[in-house]
Image: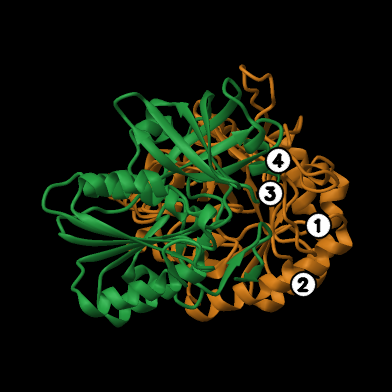
Amino acid sequence: MSAYLTATKLRTVRIIGVKDETPTIKSITFQDRLSASASPGQFVMVWIPGVDEIPMSLSTINPKEDIAAITVGKIGEATDKLHKMKVGDIVGIRGPFGNGYTVTRTRNVMIVGGGTGLASLAPLTEKIAAQPRHKVTLLLGAKTCNELLFLERMKTVFSKATGRMVVTTEDGSYGEKGLVTEPLERLLAAEKFDVVYACGPEQMVSRVFFLTEHYGVPFQASLERLMRCAIGLCGTCVIGRFRVCRDGPVFSEDQLREVKSEFGHFRRGFDGRRTSL
Amino acid sequence: MSKRLEVEIAGLKLQNPIMLAAGILGMTGASLLEAIDNGAGAVVTKSVGPKPQEGYHNPAVVHVNCGLLNAMGLPNPGVHDFAEEIREIKQARAHVPIIVSVYSFSAEEFAETARVAAKAGADAIELNVSCPHVKKTGSEIGQSPSLVAEVVKKVKAVAHKPVIVKLTPNVADIVEIAKAGVDAGADAITAINTLRAMAIDVETAQPILANKIGGLSGPAIKPVAVRCVYELYESVNVPIIGCGGVTTWQDAVEFMLAGASAVQIGTAIASEGLGVFKSVANGIDSFLKRKGSGSVKDIVGLSHRH
């Protein structure tokens, strides 16, 4: 457990790269050995000194160079401040925390991402695509063309690996017009998948879960909840009996069935009260 | 679970003396049930007040050497919303005592909050007069013998359930505060809450916690807590519940030898997981067996013989 306690300590790191991914999303790269040895789906707590501390999935995990990155959508005070940060600025990091996605020896893999959900799914896609005898189908969705995250990065993955990518936009400005769940249903009906992974807006993820249940496919989803301690103590991020920070953030179909009265329906505020999704 | 571990504290029957401490999980019925299903002999809820409260900004928690620093700012849904969570647990696991931790800003508010909690099914009330980092409540009340006495009296008058006072170590004389509470009718004492503490990041010169000052828990405070329990055992005649850094069965036994009838666990859940309740309880049971003792009650206060 001492390795765990080492990871939970706060350390400050200097930002070594800032990249505009879309008009509203930036990736921030930093050097941190612990983050760089994380598993896809794990997250870190990012401290913006004097402002806030927020949970962020690791979108790049590069153990060779001890480099990791987070990918940040502009949604509030803390993320606005992160968007204004430059190379050389200091942030605090705790973690990595959580379980990450479980990658098994299954062959035919489906990955479904919406919005910034791609942040945790990009390193997963790269990891699975690099394994021999795996076929990956990536479904990538966004509202409109310029909000599609990691499009070029994923194109590079599929130029080398066995698999395919299907892109949807709600306004039809790129790929298929509509929601990502439409090609998902078509593919699940036509083909046998060994596992489906999903991350994105909870309404989308819960719709994906409904479909994987219907077609009897094993499922893993990364969930998002408000967080404080990230070490399983404070109870802010609970869903049912699970702590998203410690038991998740990735949950299996069995676990999601257990919390089906909450998953896709409501989350709790910092005061513990329910807010409908 | 072994009969040896059964204890009774202020009329509450516990199958084992290992409790979930206040502030840990405890914000929802489901997470309290999870602690019960992992073997907790009783659970103390998150502190609830008269109204919902979001608490402080993050960072609210940070690890330091040998301990954990937190300033959550008493986040809670308010006792009226929380009543639903209390009912949920009582329906599901009636045999395990649920102790509702209560905080407020005046004795009258304490009484009203405790009354609502008791009516919803709380088996006992633990008075949080010891949170070290929220103004006009917690330790600002718990550092004054007369304020503690007033809160206990008003709560006792309306709650009709055992009342436990959780003490702050941030005082010159913890015994004086405990005596005031017991004289006013407190049925038991929990010792101790966190120690006022802080951490500063050296690169940015910023205090790390958003509230700057918080409370220290974990192994770092265990010797302080054991000393408090030891002093209290010599001076008060109500059961004492030890709290502060319990991680292993040896820690729990040490508290009991000092005079604790039961112990609470919080911070150790981070390093040991929820399995800590069973591992500590099983460890105590093996210890008692090895010592030829028939009941955990036999070792309470044993160190005072020397």
Q: Which residue is mark 1?
A: B104
Q: Is residue B107 left or right of residue B35?
A: right
Mark 1 and mark 4 in contact? Answer it, CB < 8 Å: no
The crowd level at tag 3 (other Cα within 10 Å; few <14, some 14-19, many 20+) is: few
| Mark 4 vs mark 2, CA separation in Å | 23 Å
Q: Which residue lies most toward the front here?
A: A173
**Residue placed at 22% from the left, 56% from the top?**
A163
The crowd level at tag 1 (other Cα within 10 Å; few <14, some 14-19, many 20+) is: many
Q: Chain of mark 3?
A: A
Q: Which residue is mark 3?
A: A76
Report x, y in % for residue A271: 69, 60
Q: Which residue is mark 2?
A: B115
Please tell me which residue lies in front, B289 or A136: A136
Q: Within the image, what quadrant is residue A221 found in? A: bottom left
Disc 3 on helix, strand or loop?
loop
Q: Which chain is green?
A: A
Q: Chain of mark 1?
A: B
Report x, y in % for residue A216: 25, 78
Whether residue B160 is visible, yes or no, is no
Q: On the same chain: label 3 and label 1?
A: no
The amino acid at mark 4 is Thr
Whether residue A97 is visible, yes or no, is yes
Q: Nearer the viewer, mark 4 or mark 3?
A: 3
The amino acid at mark 1 is Ser
The amino acid at mark 2 is Arg
Q: Colour of chain B?
A: orange
The amino acid at mark 3 is Gly
| Mark 2 vs mark 3, CA separation in Å | 39 Å
